[in-house]
Amino acid sequence: MPAVVIGEQNETCSYAADEILHDGKTIHIRAIRPDDKRRLADHFTGLSADARYFRFFGHKRELTRQDLVRFTELDFARHVGIAATLHQAGRERFIGVARYVHKQTPSRAEVALAVLDNYQGAGIGLLLIRHLARIAQRSGIIRFEADVRGDNSRMLAVLAKSGCIVNYATCAGIIHFMLSCPEVSGAKH
């Protein structure tokens, strides 16, 4: 079980945990903070064009200043964001990010994630979903929802391996997933 710290500080969450990947590398998973704008911009530019297309459902070339504010200045009540990080060459680098935003139904949240191409398949996406689920449980969220393009095979594989009960519906090449994770719903699998 990873060490986890959850606390409120200046209206931001100080969630943090260390995890060991399949290859033995240790990564740090933590709350995204307002001072992460540069790290998030670097993460975005490190994603392949395909990864950006799948994440944003279109060709997005850069994160705007407004995007960076929206994705880093979070309230950790309605909008929660976490990052998987590594320290390389003396600096912290985002290798994966995930977030959820409460939907109009208080017990549901829209979830999204993006992992750098070189780190896909290492289990980072699964870890990010599980950590988001831990945070969500404390907020009364019992279901995550996600829209995924039908040709996004990597994300479809992550959802299939997530340990969540997955229900879905399709519409015009988009798959709408409803995930009930053990951490979120309190269910035991």
Image (cartoon, grey):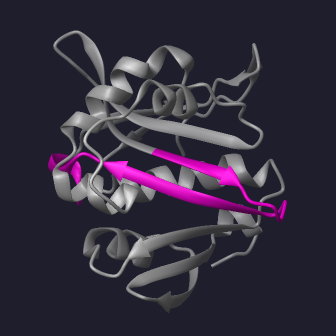
174 or 39: which is nearer to us? 174
Magenta span contains residue 94: no
Q: Position of residue 109 (x, y in %)?
A: 69, 60
Compared to 106, does 154 lie above or below?
A: below
Q: Position of residue 114 (x, y in %)?
A: 36, 50
Compared to 47, does 172 lie above or below?
A: below
The residue drawn where x is 18% and y is 51% is 117
Q: Quadrant of the C terminus?
A: bottom right
Q: Residue furthest top?
A: 90
Asked whether the viewer can see residue 2, the reply is yes
Magenta span contains residue 113: yes
In this picture, which residue range is highlighted in magenta?
Answer: 98-122
Number of numbered discs overlaid on the protein picture: 0
Q: Is residue 40 left or right of residue 151?
A: right
Asked whether the viewer can see residue 122, the reply is no
The residue drawn where x is 24% and y is 39% is 25
Q: Position of residue 50 (x, y in %)?
A: 19, 59
Q: Specify the quadrant of the image occupied by residue 137.
A: bottom right
Q: Specify the quadrant of the image occupied by residue 142.
A: bottom right
The residue drawn where x is 35% and y is 68% is 155
Q: Specify the quadrant of the image occupied by residue 5.
A: top right
Q: Is residue 41 left or right of residue 8?
A: left
Q: Is residue 94 left or right of residue 66?
A: left
18 or 85: which is nearer to us? 85
Compared to 127, does 85 lie above or below?
A: above
The residue drawn where x is 22% and y is 35% is 45
35 or 121: which is nearer to us? 35
